[in-house]
Image (cartoon, rainbow, N blue to C red):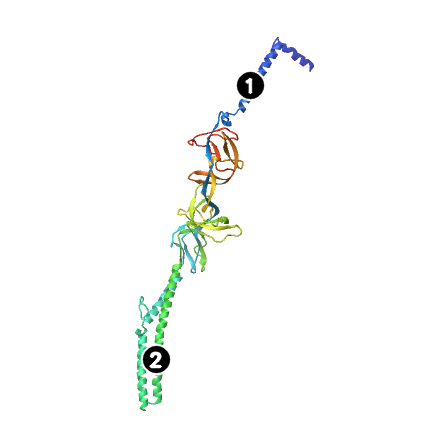
Amino acid sequence: MYSKRAKYLSEIPAHGSNLTGFMKTFYRMAGAIASAAIFSCGCSKSVPSSVLGDASHPTPVHLYTVSEETAQRRVQAAGSLFALEESILSAQVEGRVSQVLVDVGDTVQEGQPLIIIDPQELQYEVDRQRGLVTQVRAQLGVGPNDPPPADPQKMASVQRAAADLFDAERKYGRAQEMYKDKLISQQQLDEAASRFQSTQAGYTVALQEVDRLKALLVSSEASERLAEKKLKDATIRAPFPGSIKTRDVHPGEFLRLQGPVLVLVRTDTLRARLAVPERWAGWVKDGATVDLQVEAFPGESFHGRVSRINPAVAQDSRTFDAEALIANPEGRLKPGFFVQASIPSQKEERTIFLPEGAVNYRYGVYKVFLLNGNRVSERQIRPAGQTEDERGKRFEVAEGLKPGDRVAVAISGDLRDGATVQEQPEGTTPALK
């Protein structure tokens, strides 16, 4: 090893006769490399003064002077959508299902046939009741469309009984005179009296029979109408316009009385049932316009109107129900949707609002930059919510600002605590964060 090192050292003069010159050249090259490295590092860590916002390069900003405004409070509530009407349709007559004309999801109109039950037996019952009505009318001596007789004395049966009574009464009177003159026996007188009493009873029965037939006609006609109604009920129709939610029958099934067949929902108007915190009980009124949002249509608002308010507060949730009606002619909204609602109240308060671009959000903290002289300083705030109106999107500030504070918003780039700023006219759009 020592011999190799000696050999290497012995070969160094061969590359140059002057060892000192070689070393100077080496040091010059090393110095040049070190200078380049230092220059490169210095360039990579330098930051433009315009970003830092120093006195020579102030950051252009817009300034907003904080002031109080009168705000009408809106109540935030959540709830669900329900159909305006939801009916479980059932069979009003028994029978075999002949046809099912609709299925789940079909849209139907009021009065549209949905299910048809075999009407054969019901038609037989209608015919039987019509025959009974015809028979009673014949006994009363009136036509199919004539009203019952108002005067029983005009009926043939009553007139015959009245004639028999008149004849018996006359014969009984003559028998009494003849008995006084000893022309007939007591037996003959008794027979005349008995016949008179019998015909008198027959006349009374004839009058009662007319009354019975008139009552029977009323009952028979009612039974006829009931049979006709049952025949109509064999066709189950939609009681209102809507859509079929469920179907529980199939052709050929035998339906029992009141057996459920379909569930029909009306969705051209929906009910939004909202849970409102009890502290707003005195501020929410009937007729207020409600803004609603659903997850199915993000960014889109629907409008309804408060129709009724539950007078009781639920003890478990400390909320009360407010119901709003929403027009839904195109059927975009569905019963069961979760909704978030904003309800205007009659409560007004003084509060502070800031444009959305004036509020910075970093790592769960909301902050603004306040102007102090020609520099800005960070200030943490607590927002009370966000709103959007004719002035655009704005934050309501609950804590951290007071009237008269001046908030800076960078036109381009970012602000930092202590940066020097310069106000620019409102024509330039501020940067949104």
**Does any portion of residue 323 appear in the rendered image?**
yes
Q: Nearer the viewer, residue 428 or 62?
A: 62
Label 1: few (<14), some (14–19) or many (≥20) C-alpha neighbours in 10 Å: few
Residue 137, position in %: x, y?
Answer: 33, 69
Out of 369 and 331, give the one closest to the viewer.
369
Q: Residue furthest right?
A: 2
Residue beneath the point at 55% across and 20% down: 39
State the separation of the CA atoms marked 1 and 2: 147 Å
Q: Where does label 1 land, which residue?
A: 36
324 sits left or right of 165 in the view = right
Q: Measuring from the top left, give residue 95's x and y in whole percent.
A: 43, 60
In the rendered image, which quarter is residue 190 located in? bottom left
Q: Is residue 298 visible?
A: no
Residue 200, numbered circle: 2
373 and 206: which is toward the camera = 373
- Left or right, residue 290 beside residue 157: right
Residue 238, horizontal then vertical, whole percent: 40, 54
Identify the amino acid type marked 2: Gln
- Location of residue 88 by image quarter: bottom left
Q: Amino acid at mark 1?
A: Ala
| Front of the two marks 1 and 2 | 1
Label disc, if present, on residue 389 of the rendered structure: none
**Label 1–label 2 contact, CB within 8 A:** no
* Vertical comparison of 96 with 63: above or below: below
- Give the vertical position of 163 relative to 294 (above or below): below
- For marks 1 and 2, the one nearer the N-term is 1
